[in-house]
Image (spheres, rainbow, N blue to C red):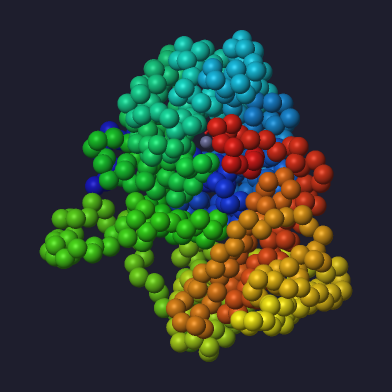
């Protein structure tokens, strides 16, 4: 099933680090974003949308660090059609080998009237001015008509003409609210792609999944002239998410005679990219998810198993190896060395510094002494713990003692290292974890609400490693996810909470007092996220 002679290239614009990060609870640190960006290079995407630099100092730093390090794909920064956004965006991507400014403004009547409170001539004037400003910074400028699919097509054409005239080299037509149906979305894309003004311009699609049609709409756009597709790994993104990168890529690859289009993505990297993004965002992949779900290549029914054994083509339309699907969990024993552990981690795109790897190997051995088998999930959990440690400078837990019983209220005393000194504090709670959390929050001067607490026993057995994920929400509604792994549930919980508080603290210090007012909602249709 190779690329057919008449196949056209479609550029993959990955927005996992921007639109994907807007998923509730999916915020990432700059370090985590860099790890994902490195994996996106291995996946060979054409464009990485690294973030929304004006949103906060954190976002700016993450985009800048990615722009400094990642050389092959284009690095895009999202900017509203406003001078301060474009200036800040341009600064963040200045170090990039291939910088792109992606600027947008809404064009549907409903957005003009209720959100922007602008007339159509005012929008046209803004597009001309802001695309022009972006062009004064970089030659590669993408313009998006937000809510394009609900915009009046004749106005949309005027907007597109204005943007192209001002220097836009890519025109993106988002189905921002996931409302379009494949045939109508395709028809809109065709009308814009056929405009004589768009002859030398790349038409792009960007679809949301509110009705479960993001991938179908994106493919319809490609069939109607789009040559760039915007998507995210695992389909994460605002509300119901974006078009899933792996699904778009594998549709084109599996049906070349239908689409006559291909991407440059190295499909064998899809599975590990998916797992890496799931790990670092704390958003697990559903088992039955197309392409990368744990069940995607599993055959349960006897009749299917029989067919597959006779010839895989009976029930499999893709080879598992084509998406890099690894099959069953690799078992790591206590005698496994650095290479096996490195292989597990690099298998999902985590590359550790040598001292971090040494620490992980030590901890795996320690765990191996306590339990018989150590699975790859244990190894990943330990590595995450080690990686997070480098990000937690402000305070740490030194020890705790807790007492509880059926008739005895839980009481915990914890010893912390805070502001250079040891602090001891005691509190009661409903259970030991609650008591330790109460003790911790008594002495920390941070305003953040515990929004989610989840516990996963990574391996079976009562001596399993416990992986705790917490999500904290700061005063401005920003969410901070952190995870910790330990064989003691209480210690794992405390470590996760402390990691989370440290993230809130560091971010607050970086962003200063004004960070709240700078944050804007990109998608007015969503009340849930104030992420950008
Ligand atoms: O969904 C959308 O309209 C967007 C734009 C900012 C491109 O994400
Ligand atoms: Zn979007």
* Residue 323 visible to the viewer: no
x%, y% of residue 74?
55, 40
Residue 119, placed above or below residue 287: above
Relative to 76, is 225 on the left or the right? left
Quadrant of the rendering where the C terminus is positioned: top right
Q: Residue furthest front?
A: 407
Name the outermost residue toward the bottom: 369
Quadrant of the picture in which ligand 1 is shown: top right
The vertical placement of 65 against 338, above or below, is above
Of residues 356 and 28, the one nearer the viewer is 28
* Figure quadrant of residue 215: top left
> Percent from the top left, x then y, of residue 485?
59, 72
Residue 261 found in image quarter: top left
The answer to whether 416 appears left or right of 143 in the picture is right
Can the viewer see residue 162 in this picture?
A: yes
- Identity of the residue drawn at 54% across and 20% down: 110
* Closer-to-camera residue (388/501): 501
Could you say where residue 452 lies in the image, as x and y percent from the top left? 60, 58
């Amino acid at each position: 099933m190779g690329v057919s002679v008449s196949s056209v290239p479609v550029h993959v614009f990955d927005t996992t680090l921007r639109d994907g990060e807007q998923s509730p609870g999916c915020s990432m640190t700059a370090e985590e974003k860099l790890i994902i960006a490195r994996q996106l290079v291995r996946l060979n995407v054409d464009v990485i949308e690294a973030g929304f630099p004006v949103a906060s100092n954190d976002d700016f730093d993450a985009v800048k660090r990615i722009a400094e390090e990642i050389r092959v794909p284009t690095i895009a920064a999202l900017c509203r059609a406003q001078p301060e956004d474009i200036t800040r965006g341009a600064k963040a991507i200045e170090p990039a080998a291939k910088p792109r400014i992606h600027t947008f403004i809404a064009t549907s009547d409903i957005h003009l009237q209720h959100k922007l409170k602008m007339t159509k001539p005012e929008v046209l004037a803004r597009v001309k001015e802001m695309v022009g400003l972006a062009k004064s910074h970089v030659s590669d400028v993408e313009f998006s008509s937000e809510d394009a699919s609900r915009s009046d097509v004749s106005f949309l054409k005027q907007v597109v003409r204005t943007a192209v005239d001002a220097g836009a080299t890519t025109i993106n037509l988002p189905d921002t609210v996931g409302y379009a149906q494949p045939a109508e979305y395709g028809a809109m894309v065709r009308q814009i792609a056929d405009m004589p003004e768009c002859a030398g311009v790349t038409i792009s699609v960007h679809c949301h999944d509110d009705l479960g049609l993001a991938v179908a709409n994106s493919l319809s756009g490609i069939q109607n002239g789009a040559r760039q597709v915007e998507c995210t790994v695992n389909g994460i993104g605002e509300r119901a998410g974006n078009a899933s990168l792996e699904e778009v890529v594998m549709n084109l690859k599996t049906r070349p005679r239908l689409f006559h289009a291909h991407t440059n993505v190295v499909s064998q990297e899809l599975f590990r990219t998916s797992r890496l993004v799931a790990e670092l965002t704390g958003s697990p992949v559903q088992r039955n998810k197309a392409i990368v779900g744990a069940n995607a290549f599993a055959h349960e029914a006897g009749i299917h198993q029989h067919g597959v054994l006779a010839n895989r083509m009976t029930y499999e339309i893709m080879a598992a190896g084509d998406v890099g699907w690894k099959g069953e969990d690799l078992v790591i024993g206590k005698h496994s060395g650095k290479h096996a552990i490195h292989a597990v981690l690099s298998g999902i795109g985590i590359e550790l510094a040598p001292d971090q790897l040494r620490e992980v190997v030590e901890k795996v051995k320690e765990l191996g002494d306590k339990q018989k088998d150590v699975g790859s999930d244990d190894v990943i959990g330990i590595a995450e713990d080690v990686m997070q440690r480098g990000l937690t400078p402000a305070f740490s837990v030194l020890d705790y003692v807790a007492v509880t019983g059926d008739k005895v209220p839980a009481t915990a005393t914890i010893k912390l290292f805070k502001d250079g000194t040891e602090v001891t504090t005691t509190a009661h709670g409903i259970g030991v974890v609650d008591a330790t959390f109460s003790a911790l929050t008594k002495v920390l001067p941070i305003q953040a609400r515990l929004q989610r607490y989840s516990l996963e026993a990574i391996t079976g057995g009562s001596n399993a490693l416990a992986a705790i994920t917490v999500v904290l929400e700061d005063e401005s509604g920003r969410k901070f996810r952190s995870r910790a792994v330990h064989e003691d549930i209480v210690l794992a919980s405390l470590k996760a909470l402390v990691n989370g508080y440290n993230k809130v603290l560091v971010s607050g210090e970086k962003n200063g007092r004004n960070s709240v007012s700078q944050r804007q909602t990109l998608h007015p249709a969503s009340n849930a996220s104030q992420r950008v």
